[in-house]
Image (spheres, helix red, strand yellow):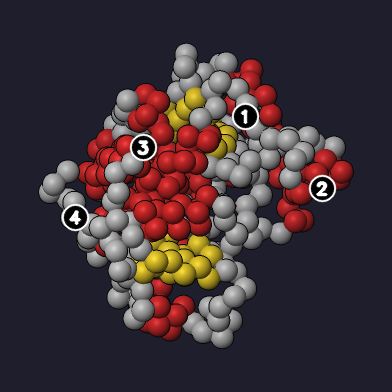
Amino acid sequence: MADINLKGRDFLKLLDFTPEEIDYLVNLAADFKKKKQDGVLVDHLRGKNIALIFEKTSTRTRCSFEVAAHDLGMGTTYLDPTGSQIGKKESIADTARVLSSMFDGIEYRGFGQDIVETLAKYSKVPVWNGLTNEFHPTQMLADLLTIRECFGTEKGKTLAYFGDARYNTGDSLMVLGAKMGMNVTLCSNPEYFPDPKLVEECREIARKSGAVIRLETDPHKAAKGADAFYTDVWVSMGEPDEVWKKRIDDLSPYRVTLPLLEEGNEGCIFMHCLPAFHDRNTGIGEKIYEKYGLTEMEVTDEAFESSHSVVFQEAENRMHTIKAVIAATLGYEE
Ligand code: CP
Ligand code: NVA
């Protein structure tokens, strides 16, 4: 753990990190989690401040950055999707130069990966990707910590992802598995498979780790041998409402159900980055019910609430892992 130094690094996508660096961040997060449980203060970054830019909404990521920063002794400024000049009156390059003259780190959640990459290019301080259309790297660290807590290791385990596999979560899980030696099966309608170039790149990376990256259209074949089942919303933030009908038609066969979980390995877990549409208790969930008669979407309520489900443990781990990213890149020393 001691040989790794991430001070000054951006955290934009897992492709930029070695398996050893990813391992280091997850171990640091586990250490922070234990310290938090034991009431040990870690406010070694007192006097530093970070900016949190959210061009899309958030519960977990925003709260994780804020709580993690406060635990580390830092101040935070939240810029919401409407309350700043970003993109409308001021370019990303100018924003980066302004914010990095005032803050010690910048989180960005928004649209294209190119935006966060530009922000990082012009920023003097570390930039952290809090989700783009293409990648969700902080989510991956929380998922890896959760898998380790459940199984001891990710090596040789199989994660099966069901649903929209060509977006941030599916893409990122494939990279995570390839790097860390965890088999990943992406199960969907072929229209929702990831960019073939990214699949090829991940298979190349996986040659070293021993992971098997599989694309599958049959949910039963994907479920067989799976240790972790994972799904995400069928329509992501920033996508137009008009796509709902086709998504429902295309992705309903890939809903995670309790009988499907029972086709997995003994002790298999259910994961979801959240938020999830597993009942009608949300504004969108209710609208979908009124329009299409569906009471649940990517996962049934029964599966979501089952003993397989580790989704809230996974959500808590967002905070500990984001704390590790902030601390490591800003040069936390015990
Ligand atoms: N999983 C996740 O990123 O949640 P939020 O959208 O609430 O941040
Ligand atoms: N794919 C989802 C992930 C939310 C955490 C989205 O982009 O909306």
Categorize mark 2 by other alpha carbons within 10 Å: few (<14), some (14-19), many (20+): few
Q: Amino acid at mark 3?
A: Gln
Q: Amino acid at mark 1?
A: Phe
In what quadrant of the picture does the N terminus appear? top left
The reply to whether callout 3 and callout 4 are in contact (CB within 8 Å) is no
- Specify whether 91 is left or right of 212: right
Q: Which residue is mark 2?
A: 287
- Specify whether 115 is left or right of 41: right
Q: Amino acid at mark 4?
A: Glu
Asked whether residue 270 appears in the rendered view, the answer is yes
Q: Earlier in the sequence, mark 3 or mark 2?
A: 3
Of the two numbered discs 3 and 4 in the rendering, the one whose residue sits closer to the viewer: 3
Q: Which residue is mark 4?
A: 333
Of the two numbered discs 3 and 2 in the rendering, the one whose residue sits closer to the viewer: 3
Q: Position of residue 67 (x, y in %)?
A: 44, 54
Q: Which residue is mark 3?
A: 37
Q: Position of residue 2 (x, y in %)?
A: 13, 47
Q: Which residue is mark 1?
A: 304
